[in-house]
Amino acid sequence: MSDVFRELLKKVGSGRHTSKDLSRADAQTALELMLQQEATPAQIGAFLISHRIKRPTGEELAGFLDAYEHLGPTLPPLPNSPRVVVFSVPYDGRSRTACVLPLTALLLAAAGHAVLMHGGDRMPTKYGVPLIDLWQGLGVDWTHRSLADIYHVIGQSRLGFIYLPEQFPLAQGLVDFRDQVGKRPPLATTELLWHPYQGDHHLISGFVHPPTENMMREALALRGTHRFTTVKGLEGSCDLPRDRKAILGVNHPDQEPCWQRLILSARDYDLHGPEVPYSSTAALLEQFHAVLNGQSCELMPAVLWNTGFYLWHVGGSASLHEGLQIAEDLLINGTAKKTLEHLQQSLSD
């Protein structure tokens, strides 16, 4: 048993009225003791559920991110220092609506933007379809790759994926605890803020509940991350909704004020409609291939809406309208499909 961890657990686990928030340094220590499993299983489970009940603070999340930076993988800056777009979405996946992020990432790469994602296998508590499964369905296997492999591929094809079981086994070791406590622990919020890249980057994080966004902003400010976007996306992802207004927060170090609220409607661009439901991975992948072949299908408006926005948002087009046109052109002229083929080749080298 870790006596140090026991004292930290006493702080967060004393109940609604007497529990105390951890300092940033203490939060880092607590998570490192859990990641290295120097804390006992009983201590880890108690901490995860009591900290969820207490609710994390921005300072604690900053400490958790410090632990991830200390013990987890980090890609070094790419040659010529391109700005990498880092998409961070819930690790427990999607179960109700179709995910289009892999296609958005492909199209951004086809337009010349480097993209990094991260995640693992099916994970509690939702056990929805994870990004890794969708990539595998596209013929792109990010498993069993070293960090050096990922660095090579993102340099060659402008796409990378940090796969938790392979590149961060310490974090993977806590997955069983998440299953046993039956609720998303604060680690789930930490993952939304993690950007395992040392160079210039633009972090894009999904969220569900408004209070989470405030904690995210505080944690990122403490960590010195000044270029980020928060997205109230589908099921907490970065996928923009089409059946309601999209609500985003944009923090940009070169604008005044640096924090701005952005509200968009797909209706204004003739792309509104009901969200495409997720029925099975096989059915979704069939739609993926239809989109990549430039065929009109149910999923196409969602792909155009998301890609068009993100192209504009990361500086790939002068306007959202232009971003939408670029996205459509990349699909119609086959550039997106060629980008996928190049990615497949890079991973087979």
Image (cartoon, rainbow, N blue to C red):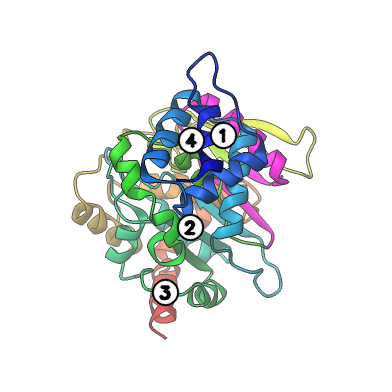
Residue at label 2? 117
Could you tell me the amino acid type at mark 4? Phe
Could you tell me the amino acid type at mark 2? Met
Nearer the N terminus, badge 1 or badge 4?
Answer: 4
Contact between marks 1 and 4 (CB within 8 A): the answer is: no
Q: Which residues are magenta?
A: 199-228
Residue at label 3? 145
As for residue 306 lying within the magenta part, the answer is no
Nearer the N terminus, badge 2 or badge 3?
Answer: 2
Nearer the N terminus, badge 4 or badge 2?
Answer: 2
Q: Which mark is residue 207?
A: 4
* Distance between the alpha carbons at the discs numbered 4 and 3: 29 Å
- Residue 50 position, x and y percent, is 44, 28
* Distance between the alpha carbons at the discs numbered 2 and 3: 14 Å
Contact between marks 2 and 3 (CB within 8 A): the answer is: no
Crowd band around label 4 with a 10 angstrom C-alpha radius: few (<14), some (14–19), many (20+): many
Residue at label 1? 248
- Residue 293 position, x and y percent, is 32, 64
The residue tagged with tag 4: helix, strand or loop?
loop
Nearer the N terminus, badge 3 or badge 1?
Answer: 3
Could you tell me the amino acid type at mark 3? Arg
Q: Is residue 144 visible?
A: yes
Q: Is residue 289 above or below residue 222?
A: below
The residue tagged with tag 3: helix, strand or loop?
loop
